[in-house]
Amino acid sequence: MIQHQSDSGIGFKASAFGPDFHWGVAISAAQNEGAILSDGRSVSIWDVFARRSGVIKRGVTPAQACDFYHRYKDDILLVKALGFNSFRFSISWSRILPDGSGKVNVQGIRFYDDVINECLLNGLIPFITLYHWDLPQVLQQQGGWVSPLINKWFRHFTKICAKAFGDRVKHWLVLNEPVGFTSLGYMMGKHAPGKQNLSFFLRAVHHAAIAQAEGGRILRKYVDGARIGTTFSCSEVIPATLNKNDLTAAARIDLLLNRLLVEPLLGKGFPEDDKGLMDKMNRENLSWKYTDRMQFDMDFIGLQNYFPVVIKHNSFIPIVQASEVSAKSRQVPYTAMGWEVNPSSFQNIIKRFWKYGAIKELMITENGAAYNDKFIGGKINDADRINYFQTHLQALNQCMKDGVRISGYFAWTLMDNFEWAEGHEARFGLVYVDFKTQLRTIKDSGYWWREFLR
Protein backbone atom coordinates (compact mmCIF):
# COMPACT_ATOMS: atom_id res chain seq x y z
CA MET A 1 0.00 0.00 0.00
CA ILE A 2 1.39 3.40 -0.92
CA GLN A 3 1.47 6.20 1.59
CA HIS A 4 -1.03 8.92 0.72
CA GLN A 5 1.06 11.91 1.76
CA SER A 6 -0.48 15.35 1.58
CA ASP A 7 2.09 16.43 -1.00
CA SER A 8 1.94 13.15 -3.00
CA GLY A 9 5.66 12.73 -2.40
CA ILE A 10 6.83 15.41 -4.85
CA GLY A 11 6.50 18.63 -2.90
CA PHE A 12 3.41 19.96 -4.69
CA LYS A 13 0.00 18.89 -5.94
CA ALA A 14 -1.88 19.30 -9.19
CA SER A 15 -3.00 22.79 -8.19
CA ALA A 16 0.56 24.00 -8.83
CA PHE A 17 -0.15 23.69 -12.56
CA GLY A 18 -3.08 26.12 -12.48
CA PRO A 19 -6.86 25.80 -12.29
CA ASP A 20 -7.48 25.25 -16.01
CA PHE A 21 -4.86 22.54 -16.57
CA HIS A 22 -6.06 19.40 -18.39
CA TRP A 23 -5.25 16.29 -16.36
CA GLY A 24 -6.16 13.21 -18.31
CA VAL A 25 -5.56 9.66 -19.39
CA ALA A 26 -5.37 8.50 -22.99
CA ILE A 27 -6.58 5.33 -24.71
CA SER A 28 -7.06 4.33 -28.35
CA ALA A 29 -9.78 2.48 -30.25
CA ALA A 30 -7.61 -0.33 -31.62
CA GLN A 31 -5.93 -0.97 -28.27
CA ASN A 32 -9.00 -0.86 -26.05
CA GLU A 33 -12.34 -1.32 -27.77
CA GLY A 34 -12.34 -4.91 -28.99
CA ALA A 35 -15.67 -5.88 -30.60
CA ILE A 36 -13.96 -5.76 -33.97
CA LEU A 37 -16.94 -7.08 -35.96
CA SER A 38 -19.76 -5.72 -33.78
CA ASP A 39 -22.53 -3.44 -35.01
CA GLY A 40 -21.31 -2.98 -38.55
CA ARG A 41 -17.59 -2.38 -37.93
CA SER A 42 -15.19 -3.73 -40.56
CA VAL A 43 -11.67 -4.99 -39.90
CA SER A 44 -8.75 -2.59 -39.58
CA ILE A 45 -5.15 -3.08 -40.65
CA TRP A 46 -4.30 -4.10 -37.07
CA ASP A 47 -6.97 -6.81 -37.01
CA VAL A 48 -5.45 -8.30 -40.15
CA PHE A 49 -1.78 -7.75 -39.27
CA ALA A 50 -2.17 -9.38 -35.84
CA ARG A 51 -3.24 -12.64 -37.47
CA ARG A 52 0.21 -13.08 -39.00
CA SER A 53 2.37 -15.64 -37.28
CA GLY A 54 5.07 -14.20 -35.05
CA VAL A 55 4.31 -10.49 -35.36
CA ILE A 56 2.59 -10.05 -31.95
CA LYS A 57 4.01 -11.47 -28.72
CA ARG A 58 2.19 -14.65 -27.67
CA GLY A 59 -0.01 -14.32 -30.74
CA VAL A 60 -2.66 -12.13 -29.12
CA THR A 61 -4.92 -9.95 -31.26
CA PRO A 62 -7.01 -6.81 -30.66
CA ALA A 63 -10.23 -8.79 -31.19
CA GLN A 64 -11.24 -8.34 -27.55
CA ALA A 65 -8.56 -6.03 -26.13
CA CYS A 66 -10.08 -4.42 -22.99
CA ASP A 67 -13.65 -4.72 -24.28
CA PHE A 68 -14.08 -0.97 -23.82
CA TYR A 69 -16.85 -1.18 -26.41
CA HIS A 70 -19.09 -2.93 -23.89
CA ARG A 71 -17.52 -1.58 -20.67
CA TYR A 72 -17.08 2.09 -21.51
CA LYS A 73 -19.43 3.31 -18.78
CA ASP A 74 -17.49 1.57 -16.02
CA ASP A 75 -14.14 2.59 -17.54
CA ILE A 76 -15.16 6.24 -17.76
CA LEU A 77 -16.25 6.02 -14.13
CA LEU A 78 -12.71 4.84 -13.35
CA VAL A 79 -11.28 7.94 -15.04
CA LYS A 80 -13.53 10.09 -12.89
CA ALA A 81 -12.78 8.11 -9.71
CA LEU A 82 -9.03 8.59 -10.18
CA GLY A 83 -9.56 12.35 -10.22
CA PHE A 84 -8.85 13.24 -13.85
CA ASN A 85 -10.80 16.00 -15.59
CA SER A 86 -10.13 15.02 -19.23
CA PHE A 87 -10.31 11.81 -21.27
CA ARG A 88 -8.58 11.24 -24.58
CA PHE A 89 -9.86 8.49 -26.89
CA SER A 90 -9.74 7.83 -30.62
CA ILE A 91 -12.34 7.11 -33.27
CA SER A 92 -12.24 3.78 -35.10
CA TRP A 93 -12.39 4.71 -38.78
CA SER A 94 -13.66 1.17 -39.50
CA ARG A 95 -16.55 1.65 -37.08
CA ILE A 96 -17.67 4.93 -38.68
CA LEU A 97 -17.01 4.00 -42.32
CA PRO A 98 -16.88 0.21 -42.74
CA ASP A 99 -16.14 0.66 -46.45
CA GLY A 100 -13.43 3.22 -45.69
CA SER A 101 -15.40 5.97 -47.39
CA GLY A 102 -18.97 6.46 -48.56
CA LYS A 103 -21.84 5.29 -46.37
CA VAL A 104 -21.76 6.09 -42.66
CA ASN A 105 -22.43 3.36 -40.08
CA VAL A 106 -25.12 4.82 -37.83
CA GLN A 107 -24.32 2.33 -35.05
CA GLY A 108 -20.72 3.51 -35.03
CA ILE A 109 -21.81 7.13 -34.65
CA ARG A 110 -24.16 6.10 -31.85
CA PHE A 111 -21.37 4.37 -29.91
CA TYR A 112 -19.17 7.47 -29.87
CA ASP A 113 -22.18 9.63 -29.07
CA ASP A 114 -22.67 7.43 -26.01
CA VAL A 115 -18.98 7.66 -25.02
CA ILE A 116 -18.99 11.45 -25.37
CA ASN A 117 -22.21 11.84 -23.44
CA GLU A 118 -20.92 9.58 -20.68
CA CYS A 119 -17.80 11.75 -20.40
CA LEU A 120 -19.89 14.89 -20.10
CA LEU A 121 -22.22 13.24 -17.58
CA ASN A 122 -19.17 12.54 -15.41
CA GLY A 123 -17.71 16.01 -15.78
CA LEU A 124 -14.88 14.88 -18.08
CA ILE A 125 -13.68 16.95 -21.05
CA PRO A 126 -13.54 14.66 -24.12
CA PHE A 127 -10.48 14.86 -26.38
CA ILE A 128 -10.92 13.06 -29.71
CA THR A 129 -8.00 11.67 -31.70
CA LEU A 130 -9.14 11.21 -35.29
CA TYR A 131 -6.48 8.73 -36.41
CA HIS A 132 -4.67 6.44 -33.98
CA TRP A 133 -3.17 3.94 -36.43
CA ASP A 134 -6.21 1.76 -37.27
CA LEU A 135 -6.85 2.34 -40.98
CA PRO A 136 -9.72 0.27 -42.47
CA GLN A 137 -8.24 -2.77 -44.21
CA VAL A 138 -10.40 -2.05 -47.26
CA LEU A 139 -8.42 1.18 -47.78
CA GLN A 140 -5.09 -0.58 -47.21
CA GLN A 141 -6.00 -2.92 -50.05
CA GLN A 142 -6.08 0.21 -52.22
CA GLY A 143 -2.66 1.38 -50.99
CA GLY A 144 -3.44 2.85 -47.56
CA TRP A 145 -1.25 5.81 -46.63
CA VAL A 146 0.76 5.29 -49.82
CA SER A 147 -2.28 5.85 -52.04
CA PRO A 148 -2.74 9.29 -53.65
CA LEU A 149 -6.39 8.99 -52.60
CA ILE A 150 -5.66 8.78 -48.85
CA ASN A 151 -6.15 12.49 -48.26
CA LYS A 152 -9.52 12.45 -50.00
CA TRP A 153 -10.57 9.54 -47.78
CA PHE A 154 -9.21 11.22 -44.66
CA ARG A 155 -10.99 14.51 -45.42
CA HIS A 156 -14.27 12.63 -45.77
CA PHE A 157 -13.73 10.80 -42.45
CA THR A 158 -12.74 14.02 -40.66
CA LYS A 159 -15.76 15.93 -41.93
CA ILE A 160 -18.14 13.19 -40.77
CA CYS A 161 -16.61 13.14 -37.27
CA ALA A 162 -16.54 16.93 -37.00
CA LYS A 163 -20.20 17.28 -37.96
CA ALA A 164 -21.33 14.35 -35.79
CA PHE A 165 -19.45 15.18 -32.59
CA GLY A 166 -18.35 18.82 -32.84
CA ASP A 167 -21.42 20.14 -31.01
CA ARG A 168 -20.09 18.55 -27.79
CA VAL A 169 -16.38 17.92 -28.42
CA LYS A 170 -14.19 21.02 -28.70
CA HIS A 171 -10.72 19.45 -28.23
CA TRP A 172 -9.37 17.54 -31.23
CA LEU A 173 -6.12 15.80 -32.18
CA VAL A 174 -5.72 15.06 -35.88
CA LEU A 175 -3.04 12.35 -36.04
CA ASN A 176 -1.33 10.23 -33.42
CA GLU A 177 2.45 10.00 -33.92
CA PRO A 178 2.63 10.12 -37.72
CA VAL A 179 6.36 9.32 -37.77
CA GLY A 180 5.52 6.22 -35.78
CA PHE A 181 2.86 4.72 -38.02
CA THR A 182 4.66 5.64 -41.25
CA SER A 183 8.08 4.29 -40.24
CA LEU A 184 7.01 1.21 -38.27
CA GLY A 185 4.20 0.36 -40.68
CA TYR A 186 5.58 1.18 -44.11
CA MET A 187 9.38 1.01 -43.81
CA MET A 188 10.33 -1.30 -40.91
CA GLY A 189 7.37 -3.67 -41.14
CA LYS A 190 7.07 -4.07 -37.37
CA HIS A 191 3.57 -2.60 -37.19
CA ALA A 192 0.51 -2.78 -39.40
CA PRO A 193 0.32 -2.99 -42.35
CA GLY A 194 3.77 -4.62 -42.20
CA LYS A 195 5.41 -3.07 -45.28
CA GLN A 196 9.17 -2.68 -45.75
CA ASN A 197 9.77 -0.17 -48.49
CA LEU A 198 11.54 3.21 -48.39
CA SER A 199 9.42 4.63 -51.19
CA PHE A 200 6.26 3.61 -49.33
CA PHE A 201 7.54 5.32 -46.19
CA LEU A 202 8.31 8.57 -48.00
CA ARG A 203 4.95 8.71 -49.73
CA ALA A 204 3.17 7.91 -46.45
CA VAL A 205 5.12 10.69 -44.70
CA HIS A 206 4.16 13.19 -47.38
CA HIS A 207 0.49 12.21 -47.21
CA ALA A 208 0.51 12.34 -43.39
CA ALA A 209 2.02 15.84 -43.52
CA ILE A 210 -0.87 16.93 -45.73
CA ALA A 211 -3.47 15.08 -43.65
CA GLN A 212 -2.52 16.72 -40.36
CA ALA A 213 -2.95 20.17 -41.91
CA GLU A 214 -6.08 19.44 -43.92
CA GLY A 215 -7.67 17.72 -40.96
CA GLY A 216 -7.08 20.91 -38.99
CA ARG A 217 -8.71 23.03 -41.69
CA ILE A 218 -11.81 20.84 -41.79
CA LEU A 219 -12.18 20.92 -38.00
CA ARG A 220 -11.81 24.71 -38.04
CA LYS A 221 -14.60 24.94 -40.60
CA TYR A 222 -17.11 22.58 -39.01
CA VAL A 223 -16.54 22.79 -35.23
CA ASP A 224 -17.45 26.07 -33.56
CA GLY A 225 -14.95 26.98 -30.85
CA ALA A 226 -12.64 24.08 -31.67
CA ARG A 227 -9.25 23.70 -29.98
CA ILE A 228 -7.23 21.84 -32.59
CA GLY A 229 -3.91 20.04 -32.25
CA THR A 230 -2.01 17.02 -33.44
CA THR A 231 0.53 14.79 -31.70
CA PHE A 232 4.18 14.00 -32.28
CA SER A 233 6.28 11.28 -30.72
CA CYS A 234 9.60 12.78 -29.72
CA SER A 235 12.87 11.79 -28.06
CA GLU A 236 15.93 13.79 -27.18
CA VAL A 237 18.69 12.39 -29.41
CA ILE A 238 22.08 12.25 -27.72
CA PRO A 239 25.29 11.37 -29.62
CA ALA A 240 27.22 8.53 -28.01
CA THR A 241 30.45 10.54 -28.29
CA LEU A 242 31.59 13.89 -29.69
CA ASN A 243 33.17 12.04 -32.61
CA LYS A 244 32.10 13.65 -35.92
CA ASN A 245 30.52 10.44 -37.21
CA ASP A 246 28.43 10.02 -34.05
CA LEU A 247 27.34 13.66 -34.17
CA THR A 248 26.26 13.28 -37.80
CA ALA A 249 24.39 10.06 -37.07
CA ALA A 250 22.59 11.65 -34.11
CA ALA A 251 21.58 14.68 -36.21
CA ARG A 252 20.16 12.39 -38.89
CA ILE A 253 18.07 10.44 -36.37
CA ASP A 254 16.93 13.69 -34.79
CA LEU A 255 15.72 14.89 -38.19
CA LEU A 256 13.67 11.74 -38.67
CA LEU A 257 12.33 11.39 -35.12
CA ASN A 258 11.69 14.98 -34.12
CA ARG A 259 11.70 17.33 -37.09
CA LEU A 260 10.35 15.50 -40.12
CA LEU A 261 6.64 16.26 -39.66
CA VAL A 262 6.45 19.23 -37.28
CA GLU A 263 8.48 21.54 -39.52
CA PRO A 264 6.18 21.21 -42.57
CA LEU A 265 3.23 21.92 -40.27
CA LEU A 266 4.93 25.13 -39.09
CA GLY A 267 5.49 26.27 -42.68
CA LYS A 268 9.18 25.44 -42.82
CA GLY A 269 8.85 22.59 -45.31
CA PHE A 270 10.70 19.34 -44.88
CA PRO A 271 14.10 19.78 -43.18
CA GLU A 272 16.92 19.98 -45.70
CA ASP A 273 19.98 19.98 -43.40
CA ASP A 274 21.14 16.48 -44.23
CA LYS A 275 21.67 16.79 -47.97
CA GLY A 276 22.48 13.14 -48.56
CA LEU A 277 19.37 11.92 -46.78
CA MET A 278 17.07 14.59 -48.18
CA ASP A 279 18.35 14.20 -51.74
CA LYS A 280 17.42 10.54 -51.48
CA MET A 281 13.99 11.50 -50.22
CA ASN A 282 13.52 14.08 -52.95
CA ARG A 283 14.40 11.53 -55.64
CA GLU A 284 11.85 9.12 -54.19
CA ASN A 285 9.11 11.72 -53.87
CA LEU A 286 8.89 14.28 -56.65
CA SER A 287 6.13 16.28 -54.95
CA TRP A 288 8.11 16.55 -51.70
CA LYS A 289 8.68 20.30 -51.83
CA TYR A 290 5.07 21.44 -52.11
CA THR A 291 4.56 22.92 -48.67
CA ASP A 292 1.37 25.02 -48.77
CA ARG A 293 -1.01 22.13 -48.09
CA MET A 294 1.17 20.91 -45.22
CA GLN A 295 0.95 24.11 -43.15
CA PHE A 296 -1.73 24.81 -40.53
CA ASP A 297 -1.83 27.05 -37.48
CA MET A 298 -2.61 24.58 -34.69
CA ASP A 299 -3.96 25.82 -31.37
CA PHE A 300 -1.60 23.44 -29.60
CA ILE A 301 0.90 20.69 -30.30
CA GLY A 302 0.74 17.40 -28.43
CA LEU A 303 4.10 15.90 -27.44
CA GLN A 304 4.40 12.21 -26.63
CA ASN A 305 7.65 11.39 -24.88
CA TYR A 306 8.82 8.32 -23.01
CA PHE A 307 12.62 8.20 -23.24
CA PRO A 308 15.74 9.66 -24.87
CA VAL A 309 17.89 7.78 -27.38
CA VAL A 310 21.68 7.59 -27.51
CA ILE A 311 22.96 7.21 -31.07
CA LYS A 312 26.25 6.05 -32.55
CA HIS A 313 27.49 5.84 -36.14
CA ASN A 314 26.92 2.46 -37.78
CA SER A 315 27.93 2.14 -41.41
CA PHE A 316 26.16 -1.23 -41.72
CA ILE A 317 22.70 0.36 -41.31
CA PRO A 318 21.35 1.53 -44.71
CA ILE A 319 20.62 5.24 -45.31
CA VAL A 320 20.64 6.47 -41.70
CA GLN A 321 23.98 4.78 -40.86
CA ALA A 322 23.14 4.94 -37.18
CA SER A 323 22.15 2.62 -34.35
CA GLU A 324 20.96 3.04 -30.78
CA VAL A 325 23.07 2.34 -27.72
CA SER A 326 20.75 0.53 -25.32
CA ALA A 327 19.97 1.86 -21.87
CA LYS A 328 20.89 -1.49 -20.36
CA SER A 329 24.40 -1.39 -21.82
CA ARG A 330 24.86 2.14 -20.45
CA GLN A 331 23.78 1.05 -16.96
CA VAL A 332 21.10 3.72 -16.54
CA PRO A 333 17.57 3.20 -15.15
CA TYR A 334 15.17 1.70 -17.67
CA THR A 335 11.63 0.34 -17.90
CA ALA A 336 10.40 -3.13 -18.83
CA MET A 337 10.53 -2.01 -22.47
CA GLY A 338 14.24 -1.20 -22.12
CA TRP A 339 13.49 2.52 -22.34
CA GLU A 340 15.71 4.87 -20.36
CA VAL A 341 14.07 6.73 -17.47
CA ASN A 342 15.33 10.31 -17.72
CA PRO A 343 13.11 13.20 -16.57
CA SER A 344 15.84 15.75 -17.42
CA SER A 345 15.66 14.59 -21.03
CA PHE A 346 11.86 14.97 -20.90
CA GLN A 347 12.40 18.57 -19.86
CA ASN A 348 14.97 19.12 -22.61
CA ILE A 349 12.78 17.87 -25.45
CA ILE A 350 9.82 19.99 -24.30
CA LYS A 351 12.00 23.11 -24.32
CA ARG A 352 13.43 22.12 -27.68
CA PHE A 353 9.98 22.11 -29.31
CA TRP A 354 9.01 25.35 -27.58
CA LYS A 355 12.03 27.05 -29.16
CA TYR A 356 10.40 26.77 -32.58
CA GLY A 357 8.54 29.93 -31.55
CA ALA A 358 5.61 29.32 -33.88
CA ILE A 359 3.97 26.88 -31.46
CA LYS A 360 1.29 28.61 -29.38
CA GLU A 361 0.89 26.00 -26.69
CA LEU A 362 2.04 22.49 -25.81
CA MET A 363 0.25 19.57 -24.24
CA ILE A 364 1.84 16.33 -23.09
CA THR A 365 -0.62 14.00 -24.76
CA GLU A 366 1.21 10.80 -23.75
CA ASN A 367 3.78 9.97 -21.07
CA GLY A 368 4.15 6.87 -18.96
CA ALA A 369 6.04 3.67 -18.33
CA ALA A 370 5.64 -0.11 -18.63
CA TYR A 371 6.85 -2.28 -15.77
CA ASN A 372 6.51 -5.97 -14.93
CA ASP A 373 3.56 -5.49 -12.59
CA LYS A 374 2.93 -8.25 -10.07
CA PHE A 375 -0.57 -8.97 -8.82
CA ILE A 376 0.02 -9.95 -5.20
CA GLY A 377 -2.67 -10.24 -2.57
CA GLY A 378 -5.17 -8.38 -4.70
CA LYS A 379 -2.84 -5.39 -5.11
CA ILE A 380 -0.29 -4.08 -7.59
CA ASN A 381 2.53 -2.19 -5.93
CA ASP A 382 4.09 -0.35 -8.88
CA ALA A 383 6.42 1.98 -7.01
CA ASP A 384 8.70 2.37 -10.05
CA ARG A 385 5.82 3.76 -12.10
CA ILE A 386 4.90 6.17 -9.31
CA ASN A 387 8.49 7.40 -9.24
CA TYR A 388 8.41 7.81 -13.03
CA PHE A 389 5.35 10.04 -12.83
CA GLN A 390 6.66 12.01 -9.85
CA THR A 391 9.97 12.87 -11.50
CA HIS A 392 8.45 13.66 -14.88
CA LEU A 393 5.83 15.95 -13.37
CA GLN A 394 8.57 17.77 -11.50
CA ALA A 395 10.36 18.28 -14.83
CA LEU A 396 7.14 19.45 -16.45
CA ASN A 397 6.49 21.93 -13.67
CA GLN A 398 9.99 23.31 -14.11
CA CYS A 399 9.37 23.82 -17.83
CA MET A 400 6.31 25.90 -16.98
CA LYS A 401 8.29 27.94 -14.46
CA ASP A 402 10.85 28.56 -17.23
CA GLY A 403 8.18 30.06 -19.47
CA VAL A 404 6.93 27.14 -21.58
CA ARG A 405 3.16 27.35 -22.11
CA ILE A 406 1.80 23.89 -21.28
CA SER A 407 -1.94 23.34 -20.88
CA GLY A 408 -2.29 19.63 -20.18
CA TYR A 409 -0.80 16.26 -19.31
CA PHE A 410 -2.24 12.88 -20.30
CA ALA A 411 -0.88 9.71 -18.73
CA TRP A 412 -0.51 6.70 -20.96
CA THR A 413 -2.65 4.86 -20.17
CA LEU A 414 -5.85 4.27 -18.23
CA MET A 415 -5.57 0.49 -18.24
CA ASP A 416 -3.33 -2.27 -19.54
CA ASN A 417 -4.30 -2.89 -23.15
CA PHE A 418 -3.31 -4.35 -26.51
CA GLU A 419 0.09 -2.70 -26.79
CA TRP A 420 0.68 -3.21 -30.53
CA ALA A 421 3.49 -5.68 -31.29
CA GLU A 422 4.02 -6.22 -27.56
CA GLY A 423 0.53 -7.69 -27.24
CA HIS A 424 -0.40 -7.91 -23.56
CA GLU A 425 3.22 -8.11 -22.41
CA ALA A 426 3.79 -4.37 -21.96
CA ARG A 427 1.60 -3.03 -19.15
CA PHE A 428 1.41 0.78 -19.09
CA GLY A 429 -1.90 1.11 -17.26
CA LEU A 430 -2.86 2.79 -14.01
CA VAL A 431 -5.40 -0.02 -13.84
CA TYR A 432 -4.43 -3.68 -14.09
CA VAL A 433 -6.46 -5.80 -16.51
CA ASP A 434 -6.87 -9.56 -16.28
CA PHE A 435 -7.40 -10.25 -19.98
CA LYS A 436 -9.07 -13.62 -19.30
CA THR A 437 -11.78 -12.20 -17.05
CA GLN A 438 -11.58 -8.47 -17.96
CA LEU A 439 -11.43 -7.73 -14.23
CA ARG A 440 -9.99 -4.26 -13.54
CA THR A 441 -7.85 -3.56 -10.45
CA ILE A 442 -6.50 -0.10 -9.67
CA LYS A 443 -2.73 -0.14 -9.23
CA ASP A 444 -0.97 1.82 -6.52
CA SER A 445 -0.03 4.33 -9.24
CA GLY A 446 -3.73 4.91 -9.86
CA TYR A 447 -4.27 5.62 -6.17
CA TRP A 448 -1.23 7.89 -6.25
CA TRP A 449 -2.81 9.91 -9.07
CA ARG A 450 -6.06 10.15 -7.11
CA GLU A 451 -4.19 11.65 -4.18
CA PHE A 452 -2.13 13.97 -6.38
CA LEU A 453 -5.24 15.30 -8.12
CA ARG A 454 -7.39 15.49 -4.98
Image (cartoon, helix red, strand yellow):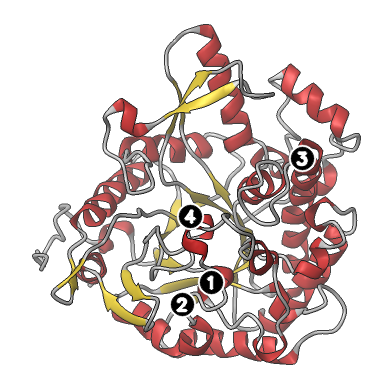
Q: Nearer the N terminus, badge 3 or badge 4?
A: 3
Q: Count neighbours of disc 1 (C-alpha within 10 A) and say few if under 14, some if 14 to 19, many if 20 or more.
A: many
Q: Which residue is mark 1?
A: 89
Real-space CA distance between mark 2 and mark 4, rounded to the nearest whole angstrom: 26 Å
- Residue 129 rendering spot, x and y as whole percentages: 60, 66
Real-space CA distance between mark 3 and mark 4, rounded to the nearest whole angstrom: 33 Å
313 shown above or below 361 = above
Name the mark on residue 165.
none
Q: Which residue is mark 4?
A: 363
Could you tell me which secondary element the residue under label 3 belongs to?
loop
For the residue marked with disc 2, what is the amino acid?
Cys
Q: Which residue is mark 3?
A: 197
Residue that lies at the very extreme toward the top in this rendered image: 243
Real-space CA distance between mark 2 and mark 3, rounded to the nearest whole angstrom: 33 Å
Q: Nearer the N terminus, badge 2 or badge 1?
A: 2
For the residue marked with disc 1, what is the amino acid?
Phe
Residue 223 relative to residue 406: left or right: right
